[in-house]
């Protein structure tokens, strides 16, 4: 076998050794999409297809921008080491593929860990929101006027703090509302009427009111 044939055989072997990036990209993009669907970091339902699209954008960022930049740095360091030790460095393609593969794996693990870590917070917020809804309904049924009870289906809620909600029910005059301030952090939860009749869509948020 000539030296040129040995060179290309060796280079092909190197390329095959480094050709994991795109198969891993395909597998982990699907896996990431299912993670986003099943363990949504935002707590909102995310369709599997949308999850895969979001994951593909994130993974393309890893392999298209971060991996090439990092691979170039690694190749430069290898070449400096090659000059000192006299050993042949891996081809740029192999370093690029291995770097991209590693970043994809790290990204998938980070997504899984962060999604799992956020689940207790999301579940807690969901439970608090549901408890607030039950409290408001019970209060309105027990103490609300006929007008308020009639418009109960218009109830909408904003969160003023952790476990602290403002729920408003539109009155017949839609410019005004019957509002309740509910704190589910105490036992039993506290509920009191808000003297301010401004609906939630006109009510200043916590940052604006500060």
Image (cartoon, rainbow, N blue to C red):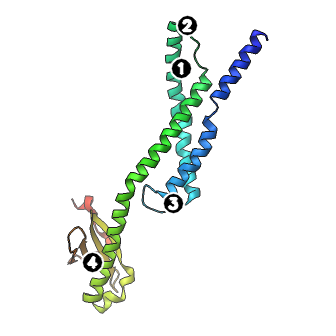
Q: Residue furthest bottom?
A: 146
Say which label, 4 or 3, has the lower sequence index. Answer: 3
Residue under pointer 2: 86
Frontmost residue, 101 versus 155: 101
**On screen, residue 8 above or below 208:** above
Tell me the distance, in whole angstroms, between the alpha carbons under discs 1 and 2: 15 Å
Label for residue 46?
3
Q: Is residue 199 visible?
A: no
User: Position of 91 compared to 206: left or right?
Assistant: right
Q: Residues within 10 Å of mark 3 (few under 14, many from 20)?
A: some
Looking at the picture, how far across and down is residue 192, in whole percent? 20, 77
Say which label, 4 or 2, has the lower sequence index. Answer: 2
Q: Marks 2 and 3: which is nearer the front?
A: 2
Looking at the picture, how far across and down is residue 180, in whole percent? 25, 77
Residue at left 54%, top 30%? 99
Tell me the distance, in whole angstroms, between the alpha carbons under discs 4 and 2: 77 Å
Say which label, 1 or 4, has the lower sequence index. Answer: 1
Tell me the distance, in whole angstroms, between the alpha carbons under discs 4 and 3: 31 Å
Q: Residues within 10 Å of mark 4 (few under 14, many from 20)?
A: many
* Helix, strand or loop status at disc 3: loop
Residue under pointer 1: 75
Residue under pointer 4: 179
């Amino acid at each position: 076998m000539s030296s040129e044939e040995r060179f290309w055989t060796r280079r092909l072997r190197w390329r095959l050794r480094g050709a994991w990036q795109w198969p891993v990209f395909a597998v982990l993009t699907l896996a990431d999409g299912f993670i986003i669907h099943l363990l949504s970091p935002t707590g909102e339902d995310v369709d599997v297809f949308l999850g895969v699209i979001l994951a593909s954008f994130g993974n393309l960022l890893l392999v298209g921008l971060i991996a090439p930049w990092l691979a170039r740095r690694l190749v430069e360091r290898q070449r400096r080491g090659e000059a000192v030790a006299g050993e042949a460095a891996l081809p740029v393609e192999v370093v690029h593929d291995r770097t991209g593969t590693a970043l994809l794996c790290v990204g998938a693990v980070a997504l899984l860990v962060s999604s799992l870590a956020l689940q207790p917070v999301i579940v807690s917020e969901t439970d608090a929101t549901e408890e607030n809804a039950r409290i408001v309904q019970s209060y309105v049924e027990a103490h609300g006027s006929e007008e308020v009870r009639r418009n109960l289906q218009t109830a909408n809620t904003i969160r003023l703090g952790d476990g602290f909600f403002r729920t408003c029910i539109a009155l017949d005059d839609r410019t005004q509302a019957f509002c309740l301030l509910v704190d589910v952090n105490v036992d039993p939860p506290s509920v009191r009427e808000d003297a301010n009749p401004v609906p939630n869509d006109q009510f200043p948020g916590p940052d604006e009111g500060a």
